[in-house]
Image: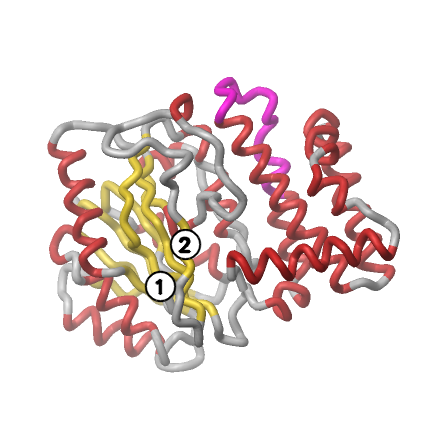
Amino acid sequence: MKLLTVTIPCYNSAAYMGHAIECAAAGGNDVEVIVVDDGSSDDTLKIAKEYEEKYPGIVIAVHKENGGHGSAVNTGLERATGIYFKVLDSDDWFKEEAYKEALALLSDMVKSGTNLDMLLCNYVYEKQGEKHKKVINYRTPLPQGRIFTWSDVGHFKTGQYILMHSVFYRTKMLRDCGLKLPEHCFYVDNIFVYAPLPYVKTMYYLDINLYRYFIGRADQSVSEANMMKRIDQQLLVTRTMIDLYDLQAIKNRRLRIYMTKYLGIMMTISSVFLMKIGDEEAQQKKNDLWAYLKQKNRHLYNHISASFLGTACKARSHTGQEIVKAGYVVANKLFKFN
């Protein structure tokens, strides 16, 4: 059994995947790196097999029919033998020193018999062409230097939410919660992070800048143009998250607050991009999304719609919608998310 499984979903990633594989394989024999070729038409599989030969017992090349990012993550999780599980996108990378520090901490947890469910580290927006990189850390909401629970968690600021880049999950916990991501759908990393949260009992925050999140390629799923083009997939992910839990049944108050705010952010993102599309069909989709939340959970609908973001995103007037879109531009400049 390995300490950590790193799954690298790849689709036509031949031009840049090598960097991701090399940095993950730097963990040595403590890790397995499952490179999942998701039905690529370029040399992705060939390159994956070359790394499998270069790092025997560490890198594993897997080929499958195209099913999308979520399907590739599902495949990695099915095959994982690591005690912990992490996803690394094929155009991203780990900072080597921070990676080894995270592995050392996970190893100490295992040796001491500690059942750590989630390790959190910082991530860095590596936005193309920008010298000053935005670092997302969790110093304000999370305790440092000890195991903690949801009852110890404080207030998360805007832009400080837990993303796929932040987390290592215990593999058994992911399987116990029945995690299975939708296929042929982008933006499922939100489900990957959100779905296990009620199963997370113990956490540790390591204040290191580990994950380097590359942004800047025009073909990336998080580019503004692609998020507008794939808005139906964003809506599917948001509805899936609404369906996952009755948040009023979540007993821990701080976890319930966090998950409610996370859903609020998902409603905001979906609403803003529908506003940016701006036609009658998009307006109807926005109305339908809010009606879906109201029908599924009126209490949650009332709570989210009463917030500043919720009120703004439900705006029907031209002026109100223009204010929301301007706010998005400002937020993007501050947090550099696409």
Q: CA distance from mark 2 to mark 1?
A: 8 Å
Q: Is residue 194 magenta?
A: no
Q: Label 1 near label 2: C-beta < 8 Å?
A: yes
Q: Residues within 10 Å of mark 2 (few under 14, many from 20)?
A: many
The image shows residue 77, relative to residue 302, as above or below, that is below
In front of the other: 328 or 194: 328
Residue at the disc numbered 1: 36
Can residue 39 be seen at all in this image of the molecule?
Answer: no
Residue 52 seen in the current view: yes
Q: Secondary structure at mark 1?
A: strand
Compared with residue 10, is residue 102 higher up or lower down, i.e. above or below? above
Which amino acid, by three-letter code, is at mark 2?
A: Val
Q: Which residues are magenta?
A: 240-254
Residue under the point 28% across and 74% down: 18
x, y (%) of residue 169? Answer: 33, 41
Reading the image, the residue beneath label 2 is: 73
